[in-house]
Image: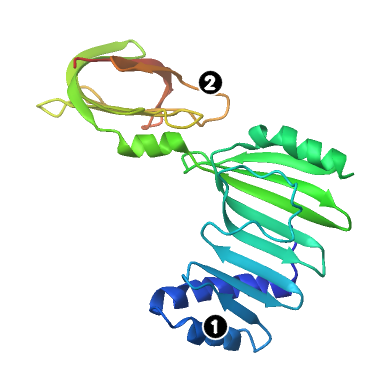
Amino acid sequence: MTLSRGTRRILALIAGSLLLLSACGGGSETLTEKAIESAGGGDVDVNIDDSGQSISLSADGEVVQAGDHLDRPDWLPSDFPLPDDLNISLAVVDEAQQNSLVSGTTTATMADMAPALKAWMESNGYDILTEETTGLRGGRGTDELLEIFMGSGTFNLEFSRQDLAYDRQQAAEEIVTDGQATLVLGDRTLEFVGKCHIAGSDYRFDYTAADGTVNVNSEIYAVSEPVETSAFAMLFDEDQFSQYVLDSNASGVPEPEVSYDPTGFSITGTFADLAGGEPVQGSLIVGCLG
């Protein structure tokens, strides 16, 4: 959604107002409102709710609300379908450009909402302009954006999906056990006992030989898709010092094959030689002896 300069100015003021709210104690809303209005050049109307948890700013026919668990905006059609558990944190309406935005968090996905949204649009004579999903690898969740044509402007409904798997992972207790491992790098095979660390869907293995000639560590982070995998091996003997890392990003290199369960895990793929030698096919198989 393209907001006017006035709306962008309001959003900038909100960022500053949140700092003012956190710095001011109870009963100081009026002073805070005046400070924000002054910062906006005197042509900005500011209202802060009694709890200090939400703020509304308006200027030049544009209204922005920000906070936690905001009420459903009055300008949003009463029959427009929203997730039951949607926590609205931002609502913007730009009357001049007829643009509007609702942003918040929900456990629903766009796939869950699509049938109701499309049915509503069809019954109200609107068309979908674009529909896209963007994944955040290794992040908290997934941002999903649906843009709907609304007369002469656009209406954007933006979800930041709560990642419950991430929350469960954060609360998982780590279990540490011995792990029997077999490492294959090209024509070399090594066997040793190291430490398995399992916490929810996070699997790690570490081993360092007493004499320092072998160091191996690996991890499978299976909380989100795609599964994130890493493996590193350092080998040292009288004739050779070498370091290998699992290569999952190079062009033309197949993705590693990964399997895991509470009894252990395995990684099979291409290992790059950090000294610049030819890559080798290899695997690490770990049995956790819990």
In the depicted structure, whether residue 11 falls above or below residue 224: below
Report the disc number at residue 33: 1
| Residue plotted at (19% across, 27% down) | 176
Label 1 secondary element:
helix
Which percent across, then down, holds residue 168?
37, 35
The residue that mark 2 highlights is 254
Q: Can residue 238 be seen in this view?
A: no
Label 2 secondary element:
loop
Q: Left or right of 267: which side holds 99?
A: right
Residue type at mark 2? Pro
**Pick the front one: 247 or 99:** 99
In the depicted structure, whether residue 113 falls above or below residue 211: below
| Residue plotted at (66% across, 32% down) | 111
Which percent across, then down, holds residue 77?
76, 53
| Residue plotted at (69% across, 86% down) | 43
Q: Counting other residues with Cα less than 10 Å from the Cα at mark 1, is it few (<14), some (14-19), or many (20 or more)?
A: many
Give the mark nearest the N terminus, 1 or 2: 1
Distance from the alpha carbon under mark 1 to that under mark 2: 58 Å
| Residue plotted at (46% across, 39% down) | 138
Q: Left or right of 261: which side holds 15?
A: right
Which percent across, then down, holds residue 212?
14, 29
Dividing the picture into quadrants, the one containing residue 1 is bottom right
**Pick the front one: 54 or 203:** 54
In the depicted structure, whether residue 79 falls above or below residue 97: above
